[in-house]
Image: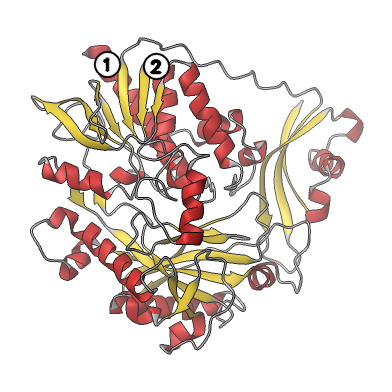
Amino acid sequence: MERVVDIALSPRDAVDPVLVREAAAEAAAMPLGTVHTSKVLKRSIDARSKHPLIRMRVQVMDEAISEAPPAEPLPAVHGNRPVIIVGCGPAGLFNALRCIEHGIRPVLLERGKDVRARRRDLAAINKQHIVDADSNYCFGEGGAGTYSDGKLYTRSHKRGDVEAVLRTLVAFGASEDILVDAHPHIGTNKLPHIITAMREAIIAAGGEVHFNSRVTDLLVEGGRMRGVRTSDDRVFEADAVVLATGHSARDIFQLLHAKGIRIERKDFALGVRIEHPQAIIDAAMYHCDVRDPYLPPASYSVVQQVNGLGVYSFCMCPGGIIAPCATANDEIVTNGWSPSKRNNPFANSGMVVGLSAKELAHHTTGEDPELASMHYQRGIEHAAWKAGGQRQTAPAQRMEDFIQGRNSLDLPECSYPPGIVPFRVDELLPPEVGLRLREGMAAFGKKIRGYRTNEAVVVAVESRTSSPVRIPRDRETLEHVEVGGLYPCGEGAGYAGGIVSAAMDGQRVADMIAVSYKFR
């Protein structure tokens, strides 16, 4: 007999497998002695009442639950037909793994360094304010996702098999909790080991991974891809090239434009990072003075319409750190991440305003309308760098001072490693963005107790929420609309918005390449 039941337990009871089994047996109306196994299928926190509960969906059986068969080893693809994959982020890595399953040999080209060597360049940003344009929080093995928390929540369930992506991550070392939790999360401290295991599996199967290999040219003949050239003048040849370069590869957007390969200006969002003491968010979300030790640090998600545009939280990091994510020395870009335990004393979140390409057109002039959003984004980041003292120190303002439009005489402690300096962030941002953020924050202060406070700090700027450019592709084949064999993929091409959606897009593109190779 098998039954699936829903139960709710206190946070303390929910971590005890014996109590979970007892509650599930009772809900299933099965005598406890007949329950052989119970398995948690889904788990979430319900903090709507004064006393938060852990809600679980549990499978109860009167016989042993058979273990899932081990994953099939990747087939050997040594000497097989190659595909070039530009970028080793989630889209590129999952594309490579799926290509191997199809018998295609992936050749990955990554402009940055391997995940271990990359750490030294992150330390240089944090401590010396030096940004390596090819190795930073955005570029390098694993892409931006490696050092931006490993959040795995996605609404893109129609774009692919979410559970298959999560199971792949588990196979390479992620905790099985990500298969159960409503908002799964790996943690920046654990992701490097997972990324390394993926790379080793790709190489063992016969694929190639080349670091410090920035693509500088796309080789096109007769309207079809023939290969790429890298910065050290090497040529890699293949009939299919996957562009999985991420949302910050401005040189790739400029290369496409210079070669007359169609790109499009795209909407994106602009705003700030807001950081609170984690205790404030815990008290508000869990209705308590001190968080129950059996509950994780609390998170929040908010959205507000202001003058017809959405103001919303983005990439919320409980127990996290604000990260410096510039890809050039003369810009300031912020993001956030958390370790797996989410045990830092601060909670940070992006707070952004969605900007349409049409609205951005009012702020941009020049001969490259396709790149207008990118230039606008870059201009804001450069202004933040100047405001921060022409270093990686970020301009910042206390939240209430931001809302009221006044100077902050001093700033609270902040997790941003290079440091923050007082500045009128509300004046740094475009007026319509600053206005909407002020009104949005004021509204969120009414929704979340204690949210509106001068203990919180507003740090500029959050500008890389998504790519400012879309590389158009055919709906069916996923090839570029003009160049055969060119496959724009993932977040940088405008078709994903996070680790899981980028991974699924990488898989979809690999499937289409397999179809193309079969019939060509």
Q: Please indicate whether residue 319 sits to the left or right of residue 390 in the image.
A: right
Residue 147 seen = yes
* Relative image position of residue 309 (x, y in whole percent): 33, 69
The residue drawn where x is 25% and y is 20% is 238
Q: Please, is residue 158 above or below residue 316 in the view?
A: above
Which residue is disc 1 drawn over? 517
SS under mark 2: loop
> Which residue appears farthest toward the right when viewing the image?
33
Label 2 neighbourhood size at 10 Å, few (<14), some (14-19), many (20+)? Answer: some
* Relative image position of residue 86 (x, y in whole percent): 32, 34
Q: Please, is residue 294 above or below residue 255 in the view?
A: below
Image quadrant of residue 2?
top right
Which residue is disc 2 drawn over? 102
The residue drawn where x is 58% and y is 72% is 276
* Relative image position of residue 212 (x, y in whole percent): 36, 36
Q: Amino acid at mark 2?
A: His
Give whichever of 501, 28 is nearer the camera: 501
Among the two numbered marks 1 and 2 on one chain, the one whose residue lies closer to the N terminus: 2
From the image, which quarter does the C terminus lie in? top left
Give whichever of 368, 298 is nearer the camera: 368
Mark 1 touches mark 2? (CB < 8 Å): yes
Label 1 neighbourhood size at 10 Å, few (<14), some (14-19), many (20+)? Answer: some
Q: Please indicate whether residue 105 sits to the left or right of residue 220 in the image.
A: right
SS under mark 1: helix
